Image (tube, rainbow, N blue to C red):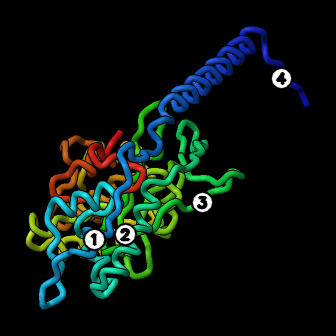
Amino acid sequence: METRKIDAKSFRALVKTGILILIFLGCTAIIDIMIAGQDHYVPEYAMHDLEPMISSARIDSEGNWDLSEAEHKEIFYQTGLGKPAVEALIKQCGNRPEKVLELLNAYQKDFFADVAVSSRKFGIITFEEILVDDEGKTISGFRLVPLEDGDIFISTSTHSLGWRHGHAAIVTDAAKGKTMEAVLIGYDSLTQNADKWRKYPSFLLLRMKAGDVSDSKDVADRAAKFARDRMEGLPYGLLTGIPEKAPEPDKIDRTQCAHIVWYPYMQAGYDLDSDGGWLVTPQDIAACEHLEIVQIYGIDPNKVWP
């Protein structure tokens, strides 16, 4: 059997190609290391005692709490919990102030805690940041508030070539803690456990605005059902949106992490892409006027995107 030899010219071309690839990967790593300081936000302002506010909260005869907008803002800055989350926790605690305070203190402790973050290669050019302990093992850094179907998860913790594009998911079964996600090139979209999001050093939970959209709960439920029934098992398509951003459901043949959130809501009648471009990103969804913040962790309350 004849053995083919590589001539000198071909060998030099192969070496040059290898060197260029190594340079490219090296530059990518350096760029991603340079933006690592944006991985987790710890408040620079002081931690306040929430007990006076909670103990003096006005509660009507039906057990409803009358917290002012200023008080909700204070709780948000101290715990990362938006108004919908606070109201859900109050209900969960049976309107008992001591239990509400206990829970808020737990969220506050997580929100102000110093953490260790590790940036790990997640794809050829993609890095993922996760929370780790002193031994470098992955840990969960915070607790999730009660979820609802159609809730939207966003993290800024993934980046490629210096672009902090983030990651997104839609909650398809809140009772079971299930999400639908498109994770990575080469893998089909799949159902995941919501608990995995607690490993990210940045987290944003969004929900349809109840006051802005009259049928917000119905919209969210329909979006969740569509994602659950129609968006699983689709190949990851980085350029999803070309040539058609919103084809008919029976023509959907690929998706990506933000698209898998955007498309079900589009089918339910709402466009969550704030800039209207052909490519929808987690940042576009985070800026959508139809959504409100339920919970943040590791994110500046004044600036939801680095």
Tell me the residue at 51%/28% (across/down). Answer: 34
Q: Marks 3 and 1, how far apart in space?
A: 25 Å
Q: Give the residue at the far bottom of this rendering.
A: 61
Taking depth in this image into account, of 268 and 95 the one nearest to the observer is 95
Q: Earlier in the sequence, mark 3 or mark 2?
A: 2
Q: Is residue 270 left or right of residue 230?
A: left
Q: Amino acid at mark 1?
A: Val
Question: CB atoms at circles 2 and 4 under 8 Å apart?
Answer: no
Q: Is residue 152 visible?
A: no
Can you say which quadrant of the picture contains the N terminus? top right
According to the picture, the residue beneath numbered tag 2 turns out to be: 104
Q: Secondary structure at mark 4?
A: loop
Q: Amino acid at mark 3?
A: Ile
Q: Residues within 10 Å of mark 1 (few under 14, many from 20)?
A: many
Q: Give the residue at the far top of this rendering.
A: 9
Q: Is residue 34 left or right of residue 13?
A: left
According to the picture, the residue beneath numbered tag 3 turns out to be: 139
